[in-house]
Every structure is written in structure tokens, then in C-alpha cells.
Amino acid sequence: MSRRIDQGLMLGLGLACLSAAFGECSRRPTIVSAEAWQQAAQQLKPLIKPGDLLLLNNAGSSQGMEQLRAFGLQPRVALPEPRGRIRRLWLLGTRADVPAGLVPLARQHDTLFTLPKGLTLSLWARPQGEVLWSAKNELYSAKIRAKGASCTQAHKGGWRCAHLADWMHVAPTGLQVKNSHKSCLWAHPPAGDKPLIIRFDAVPSGELIFEHGLSDKAAASSNKHPVRVELAWQHGGVKLQAGNSDGWKKSQHQVAGFLEIKVSARKDGQRHHCFKASIR
């Protein structure tokens, strides 16, 4: 009896191993010739737009990388983080299945071109008007300075300037502006026209939606000096300001490269200022 049980266990183990081996083999990418990759690269090159992402869909294999790069393409083997910056994504490789994490990208059913045998291609794009980038989500990567020193102390989901008073920080907050609640990033200016500088070194190209204002409490204070905001990006910039009676202000700007936000005021008393920034 025990011999039969042992034989049954051995048979079951053998089938499990065979199944695992088959599964492993099924995940291995098909080997495609260099000529096939070159042909795909030549056809794809004119379709790639600035800002597009090309992802190799080879189950982790980097085959084809050399041929694609030879045509000036820049393929990746993994999706970048954060993924929200992707406008259009090309999936090219030996696998037909789609990697996880493409939401909210939608598959485009455009007629592309006939691929060499063994390769598949699909195009994915973000719907028009979707947010590509937001200062709140990217605050962890921001470089913040005030009065000659960096602000690097973690504070309520943002950063505090440890060399200054507690209220000198950049972090998510909520303010009442014209009796309306605003969820935004606290950015109180230092005293004496010394700017608070918030810099994001890499932002996607697109339309920046910038919103800012003073709290109702600040607007009712005796300090009448406005908060000045200077926005700068690659090859451009703009000067804005928020005063006591201005309420919540909104503007749009075409940006690229980087985004720097300088916040200053002649007198800092009761200058409860916050902002929102997103790129579409």
C-alpha cells in the first residue's frame, strides 16, 4: 500500500515538474533574426514622435536592443516610474501579451505596418486632457531652498526648512479661499523678499495649469503686500502674484524641461499662500 502511495507521489511530482518546465519554456521569448529587428526599426522610426516611449515586449529579454538603437531609437525593457508621464507607448517584441500597469493608457487601433514574422507591435496612448504630471505627486523629487539653505527635513508628506520657523515648509494642505476649500501645496514666502525656491528638474512637455492664492485669514490681515510667484522653465517663464482680494487665480503655460517656482513677499506676516501645478 505504501509503495503505491510513494509511486503516486513520485508521479504527481514528475507531472508538476514537467508542467513547471513547460511553463518556463512558454515564457521564453522567440528568437528573431537581426534582419527582422532591423526591418521593424526602419518602419517604426518615422512613426515615433518626441516624447513617445518604446518598450521591448520580450519577457525581459533585451534582444533587438542593438538593432533598434542603431536606427536612433531608444527602447526600454521596463516601464518607467512614475508611469503617469507616458503620453504614447509603443510595445514591440516577441510577446503578444500586454504587461500590467498600462492604465489609463488605451490601445490605439491604427493601421501600422506589416511586421516580420515573430514580432508584434501595438500602440497605446493617454486620453486627451489627462494629467501627465502634478507637483503634489512629484514633491518627493523636488529641490527646495529658502534663505540660502536646502529644505530636506521630511514633513507631512513634503519638506520642511529645518533652519527656519516651523511654518517654512512645502507640503500638502487645505485652505479656505473665498469660502471654498482648496487642496494644495503650502508655500509660505520667507521674510524680506527672500524667495522660497521649489525646483523640479525633469517635467514632461505640455500645458502647465498653475493655480494659487491666499487663505481667507491672510486676505483679512493688515498685511497688504502681495505674494509674488516667478515660474521658470526651459526657454521661458512668467511672473504672477496673489493679493488679499485676488481670490484663487489660475493660468496656463506651455512648459518643457524643468519647472522652478519662486515664492516671495516684501513682508511675510499672514502670507498663507498655497498652489497647485499640473501638466497635461
Image (tube, rainbow, N blue to C red):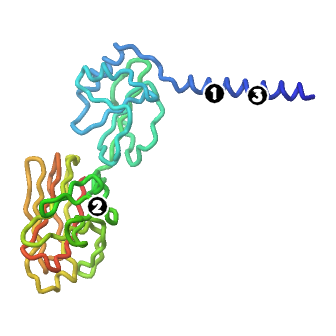
Which quarter of the figure has residue 64? top left
Q: Is residue 51 left or right of residue 268?
A: right
- Mark 2 vs 1, N-terminal side: 1
Q: Which residue is mark 2?
A: 153
Q: How far from the left and from the top, in percent, is residue 140? A: 30, 55
Helix, strand or loop at label 3? It is: helix
Q: Are marks 1 and 3 in contact (CB under 8 Å)?
A: no
Q: Looking at the picture, which amino acid does disc 2 mark? A: Gln
Q: How far from the left and from the top, in percent, is residue 17? A: 67, 25
In front: 174, or 160?
160
- Mark 1 vs 3, N-terminal side: 3
Question: Taking 158 as reference, is 258 above or below it?
Answer: above
Task: Using the numbered discs, state the Cα–Cα distance from disc 3 to disc 2 in whole angstroms.
Answer: 57 Å
Which quarter of the figure has residue 187? bottom left
The answer, for residue 129, to whether it is visible in the render is no
Q: Residue at x 13, y 76 (%)?
A: 268
Q: Which residue is mark 1?
A: 20
Q: Residue at x 27, y 20 (%)?
A: 42
Q: Which residue is mark 3?
A: 12
Q: Looking at the picture, which amino acid does disc 1 mark? A: Ala
Task: Using the numbered discs, state the Cα–Cα distance from disc 2 to disc 1 in whole angstroms.
Answer: 49 Å
Question: Taking 216 as reference, is 134 above or below it?
Answer: above
Task: Name the mark nearer the viewer: 3 or 2.
Answer: 2
Q: Is residue 18 left or right of residue 52?
A: right
In front: 53, or 192?
192
Q: Quadrant of the N terminus?
A: top right
Task: Using the numbered discs, state the Cα–Cα distance from disc 1 to disc 3 in whole angstroms.
Answer: 12 Å
In front: 241, or 51?
241
- Mark 3 vs 2, N-terminal side: 3
Dot 1 crowding, Cα within 10 Å, few <14, some 14–19, many 20+ = few
Task: Name the mark nearer the viewer: 2 or 1.
Answer: 2
Helix, strand or loop at label 1? It is: helix
